[in-house]
Image (cartoon, rainbow, N blue to C red):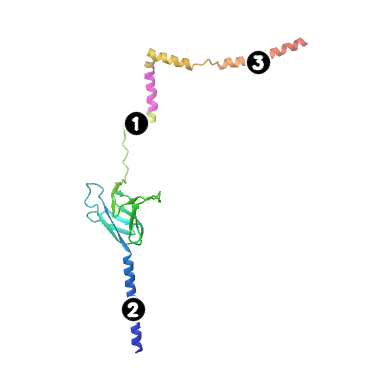
Amino acid sequence: MYCDIVVLIFLINVIERSFSHISADSNSLSELYDIEGKIYPPEAQVLSNWQVVTKVLVNGGEFIGFLKEDGTFTIHNVPSGSYVLEVVNPDYAYEPVRVEINSKGKYRARKVNYIQTSQVIPVTYPLKLKALSRLRYFQAREQWRITDFLFSPMVLMMVLPLLLIMVLPKMMNDPETRKEMEQINNLTKYDMPEMSEVLTSFFAGGEKQKSRAVKPSKKRQ
């Protein structure tokens, strides 16, 4: 009799725990939401498998979504919170979007701005994302051009003096240009004494002062 009572109590506890787990699971499932949107093809004429190589990542891969044939996607079982949604494609770049889900199940989407975090630019929900630009993994190789050779410093240093030697004599033969050059020379010409004349006048002036100082002393004697 005592054993039957113990077994009955044990069964009742097991049933209560199972019902508590079921209620907890139902509550947790009721708090999960879906993120929906559509990805437009990058160009009018694209490969038929662009949906296959395109993925939708939430928070860097915490949740992953795949595209359907029409470009739509749905990410299931996402709890309330703030998430950064990114579209990954090997050939095209898409702008990331931040999706916020409150506890009441209301959605709000806005552009991601890492520089000015306080700036809010809303985005329509369900999301509609288009490609920004094509990704470039390689840089085009520079090609040799004749202009690069002609405008190099070494070539200019060699060619410009030759041009001056060839052009200046012809310009000087022209009477008008010769007059203009003479006028420019007259304007820039200054009557500057030579250095030798300055030195001779300086020393000569010193000797004259000495001779003048010696003459009065002889008279006093």
Q: Which mark is residue 206?
A: 3
Locate residue 69, reporting x and y percent.
22, 55
What are the residue bounds of the magenta stretch?
156-169
Instruction: Quarter of the image for the N terminus: give it.
Output: bottom left
Q: Nearer the viewer, residue 7 or 51?
A: 7
Q: Residue at x 39, y 18 (%)?
A: 168
Q: Nearer the viewer, residue 162 or 87?
A: 87
Q: Which residue is mark 1?
A: 149
The amino acid type, in three-letter code, at marker 3 is: Gly
Query: What's the distance in space between the residues labelled 2 and 3, CA to CA?
Result: 129 Å
Q: Residue at x 43, y 16 (%)?
A: 181
The amino acid type, in three-letter code, at marker 1 is: Phe
Compared to residue 150, the image places residue 32 above or below, namely below
Which element carries disc 1, helix, strand or loop?
Answer: helix
Does residue 45 appear to the left or right of 26 in the view shown? left
Does label 2 or label 3 sit earlier along the sequence? 2
